[in-house]
Every structure is written in structure tokens, then in C-alpha cells.
Image: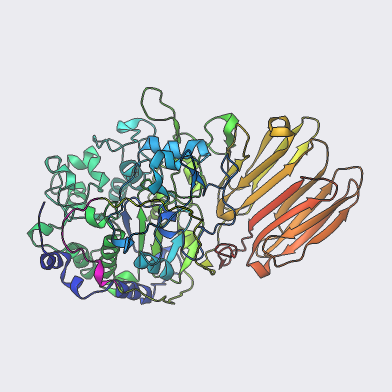
Amino acid sequence: MTDINRRRFLQLAGASAAVTTLSSSIARAARIPAHRATGSLRDVEHIVVLMQENRSFDHYFGSLRGVRGFGDPRPVLAPSGRTVWHQSDGHKDLLPFHPSADNLGLQFLGDLAHDWNSGHAAFRGGAYDRWVPAKGPTTMAYLDREDIPFHYALADAFTVCDAYHCSLMGPTDPNRYYLWTGYTGNDGVGGGPVLSEDELGYGWTTYPERLQAAGVSWKLYQDIGDGLDAAHLWGLTEDAFRGNYGDNSLLFFNNYRNARPGDPLHDKARTGTDVANGDGYFDILRADVLGGRLPQISWITAPEAFSEHPNWPANYGAWYIAQVLDALTADPEVWSKTALFITYDENDGFFDHLVPPFPPVSPGKGASTVDVHNELYDRADTLETPGPFGLGPRVPMIVVSPWSTGGRVCSQTFDHTSILRFMEARFGVREPNISAWRRTVCGDLTSAFDFAAADQTLPALPGTSAYLPADHNRQFDYIPVFPPGATLPRQERGLRSARPLPYDLSADADVHPATGTLGIAFANHGKAGAQFLVTAPGHLDSPWTYTVGAGRSLRGSWPISGFAGRVYDLTVHGPNGFLRRARGKSAAAGPEVTVRNVAISSGRLRVTLVNHRKKAVRFTFTDGYGHRSAVTYSVPRRATRVHTIDLAATHGWYDVRITAVGLPGWLRRFAGHVETGRASTSDPAIGAV
């Protein structure tokens, strides 16, 4: 391992490192006005992707104001009946906890299991209750604003996506294959499917090859380490401060391995800086920006020490991200036309509470209006657990650009293929490897941008001069101890401006006396597809998953006799806090409820009460947000009544419980957000005391 002192490190980092603070990089990026020639996606001329390593969303941003984190008012219930926050170690429940070490953002927090099998063990078919046995107690550790102030400042200055998932329940390489190729060879062609870090050499087509054929410029920025060839492990070096940590996954494809100088695949993917011989990490990137050579699409891979992969400190990564921003903003004209996506390839073994969308593995476990081809792994001749490829757990995603300023949140469901689809939308080069199911469930990231308006309000910015590594030495793992008497962490108070979303969903329950079943009618009235997760704690077959494309509908049906004591109790979860719950004791005809948006842009909800009973029923509405007093309606026998709810006081958010006099145990609950096509706010219940 190379032993380089602090002065030499500053030389390698580049001349600006000694004088540039992280806060100034954020401020400069946020203050440069956007290029708005057309007021559309076409104003983006450069797309840059920096994919870091191995952190989950809750692990970094669970306590961030206005995102779906620790203050989520509607978490999924595990089979135990407790929320998924309560992860059992076999003896007691463990909750998210903050490690006790000082200066946690610079601690060498230990790595956890993040392979396919342990990921599926934690997921457990969607039951989502085996995180501690699969990953260890450190899975529940999290960092907060005091630990990683730069990451929080980025989220407060730009747009954070709180429903962005890694693509696969597994390790780095397969997730990066989704980033660069749209899948991990799921169809078995070209050496796939790849579920681990085999790096054998693969034969399917990558997206940069499609860009090259279409005449769209591209490049990968990296350090070459000892060399980008097989003899030198394709950039993976013993010196953690050089090379690309093996994160340039294009180099595991045969066309790149066999490329020679002069071939675009070699010149654009197998070249880079050489810091061992005096280059700065960002010399080529900065020179391309200043020289007008920044490609239309670029990817950046960091050396191991700056990748944020445990056990390397999160704040080493903060320093690196800041230098990337410095380079990209070196020419304000270039930055005014640039979108930077900062995300993480997978969650390591760190817990995230939002159960990821996944396709049904059999007809008895749900349904989908779209083909789930290439989304289920069921080979019996391997040691890997059968199950869905993904989506995987949430990971951080911050959209840093002149069109995403203002500290907003975007809550549409995304994954790594969403980055490819943003590129598709902008430059028209389609990636056919992305499955139909994934295109339905995941958006293309355009909803995270506002091409019509600007908000360059800046938050308070941190000082970060202490983030430069003191030496090049590897350190022993810091293994935190789970504290006794832990409680669920509190999330920062307050709202966050929220981007409009393309969702308009419904899931209405009805009881069928003739068949003794409870039905759920899933319908998608919006412009984007969605996945619904259905849970019934205590039911042996729970959970179930339903995917409904835009403009489509599905029905699910459950025999009431299958519920303990014949008391049905189903909860439906959808995107952005969508929830429906149906509970009751009888299979006889009774009251039912349907819920719809009144009209797009109205911000109101229409609730239709239907009384199938032979006598009048008195319904009581209770507002979970506390803005409205309880309201009671009496509906005559075999009659219908409509109740309209104005949601202006809660920014379009609702959480309503309906009970019925004379029907003990009967409950209908509906919660979520009415989209109007306009910007709104985050859920007021998040972080509320």
C-alpha cells in the first residue's frame, strides 16, 4: 500500500482542494441559473451520473425533514402485527439506532452482508422481518444531519428522491449492470443472469454501445490505478486512494475487455487519470468542462476510499462529491445545461423500512396487468434463493441541477433503470433490456425536475475542512453496540416542497356474501403504473403484490374463512403513502365505501357510502390529521350517500377512518395524497409529534 502524506494527498486531489470548502461547491451549483431555452427536457445538454456505494435511504436520510423516513405515519405491518421498524433478533425487537461513536461521519463503520441470499432472507417474500438474522444488529444503525451535514445540505439545496430503489436484492455488480444495461442478463443470454460479483466477462449489449451507434457522445471518468486490464483487476487496487474500486462494470463485458486504443469502447471506458504519477483526481473532468468537451452523457466512479462503501467514512465521500461539483461548475455555462444524479448502487446490509415493489411469484401471490418476464429468478440448479430480482431496498438519490434547486422531495417510484430512461427521454436512445414490469412500476426521473421555474433558495451550509483524509491507511472496523431501551428515532420537523406526481390510484373493498369472499378492486386512473402491497398480519399467505398499469385495473379476492376467527383485515400500501384498510367480522352484505379524486386539480376527495343492509347505518368519519371534527352520516337501507372532503388545510393529504354504529370491528381507512398537477408539500404527518 502506498504511504502518502497529507501534503501529497492535496497535490493528488488537485490544486483547488486546499482552498475549496464543500459548502462553497453547493452554493455555486445552486446559484448558477438554469439554461431555459425551451423550458423543457431539451434544455438538458449534459447528464452526469455519480454512483457511490452501499448505503440505504433510512441509513442516511431517515431523519431528514420532509421525506418518508423514521416519521412515516403509515409503515407496513410485519406478520407479527408490529411495524417493520421492529426487527427481531429472535429474542427481542431491534429498532433503528444511532451509534454512540463521536464524529460518526468519519468513522470506519463496518461492512455488512449484501449478497443475493442474505438480501432475500431479510426480504422473506415481502414479509420483510428477518433483517437482523440476515444482516446482524448493525443493519439498524443510522446517521443523521450532525454526522453527514454535507449530504443533508445537498438534499436541502436540491431535490431528494425518497422512493428511489436499487434494482436488485443483491450486491454491487448486478445493480450496476442495471445502471449500464437495463438488466443483469435476466434472460440468460450473454452469460447472465448475474447475481453476484463473478465478473466473468459478459456478452449482452450495454447502453454506451447503443449511444455510440446513435451518435450520442459519452465517457467514463475514473482513475486507472495500476491499469484497466485483466492483469491489474480492471482498476481495483490495493491502494484504496487510487483506481476505480472495480466500479466501472462496463469492463466486465467482453467488447470492452477486447477493445484496443482507438476503439471508442477503449478510449471512453478504459482511460482516466493516473494519480500515482501526479494527476489530480478531477483533472480530466475539469479540463473537459472548461474545454467544452463534456460529453452528453458521463459516468463517474470514485476510488475505494471515496466511494462511501463501508468501512470507508461517509464524509470522505462528501469531500469527493464536492470536488465533482467544483469541476462541473468550473464553467457556469456548462453547469447551466447539466444534470447530475448522485445515487448508491445498493444498500449494503443497512435496513430501510419501505418494502420495495416486487412482482408476484405465482398466481396465488398476486397479479399484474403487465408481463413480469425477466423479473423472476427460479433456477433450481444453483445455490441462490428463488425469488424476484427486485426492486431492492431504497438508496439515496439526489438530483443536482439548475432545474432541481429549492430543497424539494420527489416521491415517484424509481430504480437504477430510471436513469437510463431519463437518458432515453432526452436523447431518444432506447434500452430494450428494461422489462415491461419495471417500465410500469418505475418512472423516468423527469418528475424530479422543474423546467419552468427556478428556486435558488439556499439552506445554511456546513463547514467541512476536516473531511480530508489524514493518511492513506486502512482502519479496523468500527462495530457499534445496540443500545438498551432504544426507541424509534424522531424525524426532523417541518414540511418540504414536493414535486407533483403522476399517480391517481384506488383500491376499494367489497364483501361478496354468495362466495364468502372479500374483494379489492385495484384501479389506476393516473399516468404512471403502480405496485400495491397487500398485507394481513396473521394470515399464512400474506403478503400479496399487485401491479396495475396506467389506465388498467385488477381484482384480488380472499376467502373470509382464511382469516383467523373469520375476521378479515387487509391493508393495501401503494406509492407515496397510499393506504387502504378493510376490516370486518361478517361475510354478510353490509356497507361499502369507494374513494375517488373529485377531479384533477380540485384537491378534493369524493367518498361514496353504500348501505347494502336492510336497515339504516350511521357512519362516522374521523380525520387522522386532526384538521376536521368527526362527521356522522346516516345512510338509509339500500341507499347511497356521497361525502366530499376538501383537503386544502393538509396540502392534499388525507387519512380518514370510517366506522359504523352497530357493526363492531368494521373499519374502512383510506390515506394518501390527491395529486393536482401542481407542486405540493410533503406529508404533514411525517415528523409530527
Name the quadrant of the C terminus: bottom right
Image spot of residue 347 (x, y percent) = 38, 48
Q: How many marks are shown on the rendered structure? A: 0
How was the colour assigned to the protein in this rendering? rainbow
Q: Which residue is at a point 28% across and 46% down the rendered structure image? A: 209
> Where, by quadrant of the figure, is residue 521 drawn?
top right
- Judging depth in this view, the residue of 548 and 519 nearest the camera is 519
The image shows residue 662, relative to residue 499, as above or below, that is: above
- Judging depth in this view, the residue of 404 and 592 nearest the camera is 592
The outermost residue toward the top is: 381
Q: Is residue 240 left or right of residue 103?
A: left
Q: Is residue 641 left or right of residue 603?
A: right
Q: Is residue 553 left or right of residue 485?
A: right
Image spot of residue 551 (x, y percent) = 62, 47
The image shows residue 310, relative to residue 146, as above or below, that is: above
- Judging depth in this view, the residue of 171 and 191 nearest the camera is 171
The image shows residue 371, relative to residue 466, as above or below, that is: above
Q: Which residue is at a point 50% across and 63% down the rendered structure image? A: 491
Which residues fall within the magenta stretch? 464-476
Q: Is residue 466 left or right of residue 15?
A: right
Image spot of residue 34 (x, y percent) = 39, 73
Image spot of residue 537 (x, y percent) = 62, 39
Q: Which residue is at a point 41% across and 45% down the rendered structure image? A: 167
Query: Does the magenta portion include 165?
Result: no
Q: Is residue 546 visible?
A: yes
The image shows residue 104, relative to residue 350, as above or below, that is: below
| Principal secondary structure, stretch drawn in magenta | loop
The outermost residue toward the front is: 484
Query: Does the magenta portion include 472?
Result: yes
Q: Is residue 506 visible?
A: no
- Judging depth in this view, the residue of 103 and 226 nearest the camera is 103
